Image (cartoon, rainbow, N blue to C red):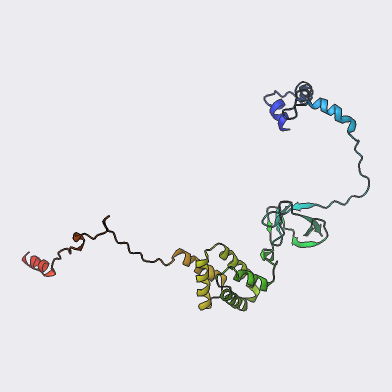
Amino acid sequence: MKYVKQNFLYNRTYHNIETLNDEVLGWLGRTANSLPHGTTQKEPWAEFTIERSFLKPYNAHVGPVTTIATYTVRKDNVISYKGNFYSLPLGTYKGKETLVAVRVEDDAFLVITDALGEEQICRHKIPVGRGNKVANTDHKRDKSAAIGEMIAEVAALFEHPEKAREWLEMIKADKPRYIRDQLIMIRQAALQTASAYLNKSMEYCLFHKIVSAADFKSILASTEQFPKKETKIVRLNPLSGEIPDKANIQPQKSSIEDFEHILKKS
């Protein structure tokens, strides 16, 4: 199409479709099909004449055919279906070729399954209109590992895993329903922070019994923004390394009584 548009149709006066069809057939005969191809250096018409004898007629398949509509999963674990976006559980996306199948039930629910249409992944209520983002908040949770494994994994990111594990167990005891989300938040912060600030913030939370991932991130950000700086004293010496006598001269100071005496006179 690009070749025809840029070589045949470009700057050509259009009269009607019949004239255009006649002109394109003439153009194909003298230009497109008769000249050597830029890459293969072969004439398309001559090659077609050779390949024609190997072509087989098309036979339509007769019988019921079950077609499964598949959709590509995006990196953020969503699919686009008829103008709306539907969420999928975290980890569904496994590369550019990740596909899922969909079917509509009772004209009200969109059921998302694996690419073969066998195992159900999730289901959503179909909204009215287009441009909607239909999401299940549970889909953002990482369920690939047990809580105990996640605690061990996150604790290993700290310089002192034993202390980190003790602190994480405190968070689990305080927030058992949200421990997975808390661990994910701490893990994300740990992977983006230098270990020195990370361990200092963790030990501060452990000592003060702070059991919140959000508070930990705030403390971590404060520690990174205002780290303690060591005072460095630099003695400026001349090239000889000796301190000149003038450096020891003490400047003269005026007495406050002198200023009082001057003011009284005025």
Q: Does residue 56 appear left or right of residue 102 in this picture?
A: right
Whether residue 159 is situated above or below residue 41 in the rendered picture: below
Whether residue 27 is situated above or below residue 58 in the rendered picture: above
Residue 210 lies, in percent from the top left, at 53, 76
In the rendered image, the residue lying farthest to the front is 240
In the rendered image, the residue lying farthest to the left is 265
Q: Does residue 132 appear left or right of residue 157 in this picture?
A: right
Residue 58 lies, in percent from the top left, at 90, 38
In the rendered image, the residue lying farthest to the right is 62
Q: Quadrant of the C terminus?
A: bottom left
Q: Quadrant of the N terminus?
A: top right
Which of the two residues, 6 or 211, is positioned nearer the viewer here? 211
Inspect this view and state whether residue 129 appears.
no
The quarter of the displayed image where residue 46 is located: top right
How many marks the image carries: the answer is 0
Whether residue 122 is situated above or below residue 97 in the rendered picture: below
Please give the name of the residue rendered at 93% of the width and 48% of the height, measured from the top-left corner. 63
Residue 149 lies, in percent from the top left, at 67, 71
Please give the name of the residue rendered at 11% of the width and 70% of the height, measured from the top-left corner. 257
Which of the two residues, 139 or 111, is positioned nearer the viewer here? 139
Q: Does residue 50 appear left or right of residue 145 in this picture?
A: right
Inspect this view and state whether residue 114 appears.
yes
Which of the two residues, 129 or 8, is positioned nearer the viewer here? 8
The quarter of the displayed image where residue 113 is located: bottom right
Which of the two residues, 110 or 211, is positioned nearer the viewer here? 211
Residue 145 lies, in percent from the top left, at 69, 68
The quarter of the displayed image where residue 98 is located: bottom right
Please give the name of the residue rendered at 80% of the width and 56% of the height, measured from the top-left corner. 103
